[in-house]
Amino acid sequence: MTVYLNKGAMHPMNEEQKKNQLSTEKDYSQYFQTTYRPPDLKQAKKRGKENVEIHYDFDVPESMKGIGAGKKFLIRTYGCQMNEHDSENMAGILMNMGFQSTASVDNADVILINTCAIRENAENKVFGEIGHLKALKRENPGLIIGVCGCMSQEESVVNRILEKHQQIDLIFGTHNIHRLPQLIKQAVMSKEMVIEVWSKEGDIIENMPRARKGKIQGWVNIMYGCDKFCTYCIVPYTRGKERSRRPEDIIEEVRHLARNGYKEITLLGQNVNAYGKDLADIDYGLGELMDEIRKIDIPRVRFTTSHPRDFDDHLIEVLAKGENLVEHIHLPVQSGSNAILKLMARKYTRESYIELAHKIKTAIPHASFTTDIIVGFPNETEEQFEETLTLVKEMEFDSAFTYIYSPRDGTPAANMQDNVPHDVKRKRLARLNELVNSLSAAKNKACEGEVLEVLVEGESRKNPDVLSGRTRTNRLVNFKGPKEWIGRLVDVQITEAKTWSLNGEAAALAEVNK
Ligand code: SAH
Ligand code: SF4
Ligand code: F3S
């Protein structure tokens, strides 16, 4: 029995709407309006925690298991780790339907484009890709092309696809990935575009089949959604409200990965520090979860992404125990100016961020710190931007992801008048990057002569004779060694620092010889 169909939906589909979904008529507006709402802050903030349900009985229906026999699929993924991980779930579902994966668009029968809406350039890339697929569809009319992920949750995107990209067969959102078997079936049968986007926040579906990309590192979702509503950000609308998985389900998944030889896991969530807040029956947070996972026999545990506001003392205490909890903290700061932080609704100050970072550094002295920064927020002044530069200098970040602010439709910041010319924003980004790069280079230089533990991920992209892997602090290291070391932990003596990577020589093979 499957109980997941639209259960607990804010806008459950009635029979009429279900029929419309399968109808061959061109007008989708009726279906669309009843199941979808565009981003609306007031509406979204009202959302409660009450109607999230967890389902343990996911299965691909028997009648759909053979649909993919002899056929191939390809998934193109844009965006963050969450999307990468969703693609692993979709691949797992498709393989359960009999499909095989392919790396080439030319022999694919199903192509899914898993999209990201975080910035305009991410969206432009996707529309470029959709455009390219038009010719392919003309050559191979039986090809099914689907668009999913965060952009599908935006009404403007769906409308644009409906108007201009009739080569697309299927659009579905982030809350109904588990409906892929039914959606693919409908897309195969229907001559018209199949659209299923739910504005409701989505239940938690456990036990989805999963085709993980590698055998060394695995992603583990600990929560979905985000309730922070930073004023610039689209994620709380595309991913819905915060929903935490049960600790026992997460721990079982990590144990399973450990048993299967995985060496590193990354716990995933948009704001992992809020983990557990919505679990009504237990007082359990990220600190408690990490303390449990610490005891599992897996060499490395990472987590991303943290919000400074919810980073509590208990978590710091647990992280300070070290062992498999690696000393790398990714702590997005976004800006060094209190005025801008306030406009962003980040709800912390420059001072409280620095204080938190000091507290973490005191507890975990060798922790590396990385961050995310946005430049050119509406009306950011030169002085405010310089406050970001001084914060970066003071924090001495090991590295940073830096972005030019991109207005997202429906978010509060998109309505703010902006008097900063784009050219000024570009120059600010370049100045910031110069500083960030010089700090990264200096931090890397300090590693020269040290012996660092490297988890070997594979051959170096530039030179197949060289192995490539990462340190506990997430630094990229290239060194020579036999291919059998891929997937193993090797101690490497660092001989030369580059801006973004380190070169070294294998020093000890302690773990390898075990
Ligand atoms: N949940 C994570 C990050 C999600 S998005 C967190 O809060 O840290 C990753 C990064 O993209 C953000 O940290 C932010 O720096 C950047 N970002 C988000 N929205 C943006 C926008 N509208 N324009 C530019 N950068 C943005
Ligand atoms: Fe977006 Fe992260 Fe803020 Fe959530 S915490 S709204 S995902 S930037
Ligand atoms: Fe992009 Fe969605 Fe992730 S907007 S960054 S793919 S949560």
Image (cartoon, rainbow, N blue to C red):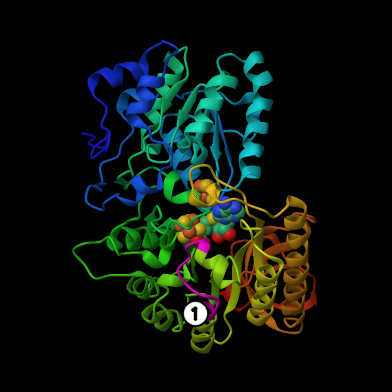
Q: Residue at x 52, y 62 (%)?
A: 343
Range of residues picked out in magenta: 343-353
Measured as percent of width and height from the top left, residue 8 is found at 23, 40
Cβ of disc 1 within 8 Å of ligand 2? no
Question: Residue 124 colored magenta?
Answer: no
| Residue at mark 1 | 352
Q: Residue at x 65, y 82 (%)?
A: 394
User: Front-most of 116 and 472?
Assistant: 116
Element under disc 1: helix
User: Front-most of 512 and 4?
Assistant: 4
Q: Residue at x 26, y 46 (%)?
A: 56
How packed mark 1 is, by other alpha carbons closer than 10 Å (few <14, some 14-19, many 20 or more), is: few
Q: Is residue 240 left or right of residue 353?
A: left
Measured as percent of width and height from the top left, residue 18 is found at 29, 21
Quarter containing the N terminus: top left
User: Front-most of 344 and 116?
Assistant: 344
